[in-house]
Image (cartoon, grey):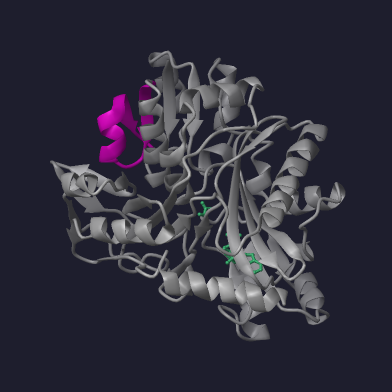
Amino acid sequence: MRILTVGGGGREHAAVEALYRSGAEIYSVMKNANPGIIRRAKEYKLISERLIDDICEFAIEHDVGYAFIGPEAPLEIGLVDALENIGVKCAAPTKDAARIETSKAFMRELVSKYNIEGNIKYAVFLDAEEAEKYIKGLTFEIVVKPIGLTGGKGVKVQGEHLNSHEEIMAYVREIIGTVGMGGVIIEEKLIGEEFTQMVFVDGKHIAPMPMVQDHKRAYEGDVGPNTGGMGSYSDANHLLPFISEEVRNKALEILRNIVEAMNTEDCPYRGPMYGQFMLTKTGPKIIEINARFGDPEAMNVLPLLENDFLTLIKDMTGGKLREDVKFKNLATVCKYVVPVGYGTVSDSGHEIRINEDGIHELNAEVFYANVDLIDGKLFTGTSRSIGVVGIGETIEEAEKKCEDALGFIVGDSICVRHDIGKRELIQKRIDRIKNLLS
Ligand code: AMP
Ligand code: GLY
C-alpha cells in the first residue's frame, strides 16, 4: 500500500518507522532533509508543507491511496480537503474539523455549547480596550494566548511571563495587532500538573494511547519560555505516576464527548487527537486540543504500538476503529537535543554528529527532527534537532537508557533538558499533586 507522509520532524520520523514496520510503501514531503525519513521513503520531495497543489501533484504522480499528515499548519489551510478531492484517504482532520486546534475560540465554544466537562473561564477579544475592561474586573490570574496557531510558543502566563498589568496589556496589544493571530483569548490560569492523553479517532469511536507528560518549558526545573516540547515520558501501565485510572477515564470521556459534539456539528473528526490537560484540585481541565499527534509524544507511544499502523490508518479513515489498540507495557523517556537558544533565538546551522549504531546497540531509539542532511553531514535547523528515546521496564530504566544514548550525539551549540524523566522531577510532580488534592 502506497502512503503519503507530510512533515519532517521527530513525530513524522516516528510515524514513518511505524509505517515501515507495517510494510507500507512510503512517499514523503517535508521541508527539511530528514535522514530518518529519507532512508525509509521510496521517493521524497523537499518543499514547504503548506504547498497544497504541489503536494497533491506528488500524491497523484505516485498514485498514493492514503495520507498521514504530521504537523498542524497544512491542516489549517485544508490539505486534507484537497487530498480527499483527488481520492486520497487521510487519517487527519479536514480544515473544518482541524479548528479544534487551529481556533482556540472554536474549541472553547464547542466545549461550552455541549456542556462538556473540563472547560475553564475564558473570553475572546478583537479589541484591546474591551480586553482591558474585562481583565480589570477579574479576581483570578490569567493566561494570554493568540486564538490561532503559534507552535506552542505564544502562550504567556501571569506570574511567570507577565508580571504587571502593563505587561499583560502590551502582550494583548501585540497579539491583536499581529495579522493572522485571529485575536486574543484570555483564560483562567490553571494550577496543577499537565498531562497528555492522545486517542485515535475514526469520526465516531476513540481508541486510547498511553498517557504521556511533555515538558514545555525550555530550561531545567520547568522555567523559561514555552517551547514545542523539550521531552516527555510515559509509564509501563500507560498511566502517569501522579494520575489515577479515574482521572484517565475522565480525560477520555472529555475527548469522547468532543468527538461526539463534532459529529453533531457536522464536522466529524478523523485522525489522531491530542488532549492536553491540567489535573487540578477540581479534576482534569482542558488546556488545549490538538488535531494531530503530539511532538515529542508520538515518539513515546509509536515505538510501543503493537497493532499494525497502516491498518490503524485505514480504520481511522473508514470509520472502523476498534477500542482495543494495543501498546507494549513498557516505560519510555524521550529527550530532545535542541539548538542553544531554542524557545527564543536559536543558534542554528551547526554540524551535529551521531553514532546511530551505538544508540541501537543500547536498544534505544533515535528520531531525526529539524536537521538537514547536506553532503552526508547533518546540520541543525532553528527547531528541535534529534529525539532520543529510552525504553525500559520502569521510567528509571528508560531514563538511564536515554541518557546513555545521548552520549552518542555530539555537536556545537546544542543542549538537552537532562532533568526530564529523572526521579527528582517526577517526585516533585507527585508531591505537588498530593498537596493540591489534600
Ligand atoms: P498551549 O500552547 O496551549 O499548549 O500552552 C503552552 C503551555 O502554556 C501549556 O503547556 C501550559 O504550561 C501553559 N498554559 C496554557 N494554558 C494554560 C492555562 N489556562 N493555565 C495555565 N497554564 C496554561
Ligand atoms: N507536545 C506539544 C504539542 O505537540 O503540541
Asked whether 145 falls inside the magenta stretch, the response is no
Is 374 left or right of 8, judged from the image as shown?
left
For residue 324, above or below residue 134:
above
Quarter assignment of residue 315: top right
Q: Could you tell me which residue is drawn at 42 percent across and 13 percent down?
A: 63
For residue 186, above or below residue 212:
below
Q: Nearer the viewer, residue 50 or 97?
A: 97
Q: Nearer the viewer, residue 246 or 342?
A: 246
| Visible residue check, residue 54 | no
Residue 74: give x, y in percent of width and height. Answer: 52, 38
Quarter assignment of residue 280: bottom right
For residue 70, above or below residue 277:
above
Is 85 left or right of 376, judged from the image as shown?
right
Query: Which residue ends up furthest to the bottom in the rendered image?
Result: 164
Number of numbered tags placed on the structure image? 0
For residue 351, above or below residue 202:
below
Residue 80: give x, y in percent of width and height. Answer: 57, 29
Asked whether 25 falls inside the magenta stretch, the response is yes
Residue 99: give x, y in percent of width and height. Answer: 67, 43
| Visible residue check, residue 64 | yes
Q: Nearer the viewer, residue 229 or 277?
A: 277
Question: Where the N terminus falls, by quadrant?
Answer: top left
The magenta-colored residue range is 24-47
Q: Could you tell me which residue is drawn at 67 percent across and 35 percent down?
A: 206
Question: Where the C terminus falls, by quadrant?
Answer: bottom right
Q: Nearer the viewer, residue 272 or 92?
A: 272
Q: Could you tell me which residue is drawn at 32 percent across and 42 percent down?
A: 32
Is 438 left or right of 299, judged from the image as shown?
right
Quarter assignment of residue 59: top left
